[in-house]
């Protein structure tokens, strides 16, 4: 365990500034914030030397938490850490003050144009951590809120959680840095969708972390933006469902991501498929959008122009030229003839309907 020599620049008091509380403490792991404040207190009361063991015993935390906390605050520019191994030297740095905006008179406020909010930068995830069963049991009993999210996860997945499941749920908090209330929102969302896979829950959490979702309001807005294309596509097809099935989602992802089609173009393909077939099937729509993608069609005007010059019906089974690879071409590619599949499916439905009618007549 390390011996830590601490010092701080003279400020006349024990400095826990409002800037630290507003800009740093609320966004950090609670354990890191408590450790920072504890270190300030020890340093300011004339206790410049302390061991990692003393900190662990006083705060009831693990040694890895201590080291990770100092690394985190160093990355935030609030401490400077030097040395290695058993002897560390740690200096508390002044907390940068936020620039205060000038108070404007009512007329100035009315005249001032509204500020454009800068889009959030995508967050880069660090190396995924591993946790042994003893660690998870310790965190469950010593960290506020962890027991509750474990219970929420069991409700969402409708089963008792194994070690691997618990590790994934805890990593949402420790590795991805999602706040506890956001994790509860995530688990409720997965529960409503009937998602029982901890791996799928982890993927959702990674997406939220990379998108810098840090509050309930941001989580709800993120879900609305994420689900809107799926919901609108299903409604355009006449399907009364809030969420697509896994196979439906794969088709829609292919249209929007791999083919890079705008949502209004997808809806236009659905309309054309419905007109030609009487009902829109996913393989038939896929065939239309694949032809448009191969032809470089990306707008409604181009769709209308292509429809005006295209023959009345395409030859079933005829394959299109291979699509140009995009940055999304790491998706698994399958050489399916979706047009032929759709045609056979449609003819099968007609034969089935004829048999039904004949049976009714005989009866």
Image: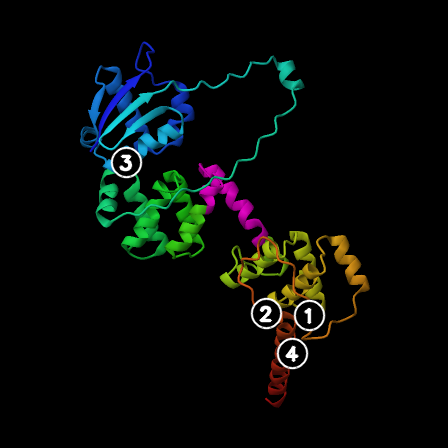
Q: Earlier in the sequence, mark 4 or mark 1?
A: 1
Q: Residues within 10 Å of mark 3 (few under 14, many from 20)?
A: some
Q: CA distance from mark 2 to mark 3?
A: 50 Å
* First in residue order: circle 2 vs circle 3: 3
Q: Where is mark 4, residue-wise? A: 347
| 258 or 245, nearer to the observer | 258
Residue hosting label 1? 277
Screen quadrant of the N terminus: top left
Per the model, the C-alpha gap separating discs 2 and 4 is 22 Å
Badge 1 local density, few (<14 within 10 Å), some, or many (20+)? few
Question: Is 220 included in the stretch rendered in magenta?
Answer: yes
Packing grade of label 2 (10 A; few <14, some 14-19, many >=20) is few
- Residue located at (72% from left, 60% from top): 295
What x and y, as percent, mark residue 21?
A: 38, 23
The residue most toward the right is 309
Mark 3 — residue?
A: 65
| Contact flag, marks 4 and 1 (Cβ < 8 Å) | no
For marks 4 and 1, give the CA distance.
10 Å
Q: Give the mark nearest the N terminus, 4 or 3.
A: 3
Q: Nearer the viewer, residue 48 or 217?
A: 48
For marks 2 and 4 on the same chain, the one whose residue lies earlier in the sequence: 2
Q: Which residues make up the magenta segment?
A: 207-231
Q: Quadrant of residue 115?
A: top right
Q: Secondary structure at mark 2?
A: loop
Q: Nearer the viewer, mark 3 or mark 1?
A: 3
Q: CA distance from mark 2 to mark 1?
A: 23 Å
Q: Looking at the image, is mark 2 or mark 1 nearer the viewer? A: 2
Mark positioned earlier in the residue sequence (2 or 1): 1
């Amino acid at each position: 365990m390390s011996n830590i020599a601490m010092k701080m620049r003279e400020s006349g008091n024990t400095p826990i500034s409002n800037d630290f509380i507003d800009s740093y403490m609320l966004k950090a792991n609670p354990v890191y914030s408590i450790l920072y404040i504890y270190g300030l207190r020890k340093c300011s009361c004339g206790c410049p030397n302390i061991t990692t063991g003393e900190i662990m015993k006083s705060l009831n935390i693990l040694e890895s938490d201590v080291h990770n906390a100092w690394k985190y605050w160093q990355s935030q520019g609030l401490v400077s850490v030097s040395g290695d191994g058993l002897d560390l030297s740690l200096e508390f740095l002044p907390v940068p003050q936020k620039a205060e905006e000038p108070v404007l008179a009512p007329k100035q406020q009315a005249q001032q144009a509204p500020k454009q909010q800068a889009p959030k930068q995508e967050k880069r995830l660090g190396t995924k951590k591993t946790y042994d069963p003893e660690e998870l049991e310790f965190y469950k009993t010593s960290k506020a809120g962890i027991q509750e999210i474990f219970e929420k996860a069991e409700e969402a997945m409708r089963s008792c959680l194994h070690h691997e499941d618990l590790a994934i749920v805890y990593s949402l908090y420790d590795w991805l840095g999602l706040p506890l209330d956001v994790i509860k929102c995530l688990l409720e969302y997965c529960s409503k969708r009937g998602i029982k896979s901890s791996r799928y829950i982890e993927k959702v959490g990674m997406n939220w972390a990379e998108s810098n979702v840090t509050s309930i309001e941001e989580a709800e807005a993120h879900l609305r933006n994420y689900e809107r294309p799926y919901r609108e596509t299903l409604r355009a097809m006449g399907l009364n469902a809030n969420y697509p099935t896994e196979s439906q989602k794969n088709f829609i992802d292919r249209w929007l991501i791999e083919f890079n089609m705008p949502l209004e173009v997808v809806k236009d393909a659905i309309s054309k498929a419905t007109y030609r077939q009487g009902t829109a099937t996913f393989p038939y729509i896929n065939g239309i959008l694949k032809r448009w993608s191969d032809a470089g069609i990306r707008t409604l005007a181009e769709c209308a122009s292509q429809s005006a010059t295209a023959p009345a019906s395409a030859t079933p089974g005829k394959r299109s030229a291979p699509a140009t690879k995009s940055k999304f071409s790491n998706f698994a590619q399958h050489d399916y003839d979706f047009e032929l599949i759709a045609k056979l499916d449609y003819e099968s439905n007609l034969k089935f309907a004829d048999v039904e009618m004949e049976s009714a007549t005989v009866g």
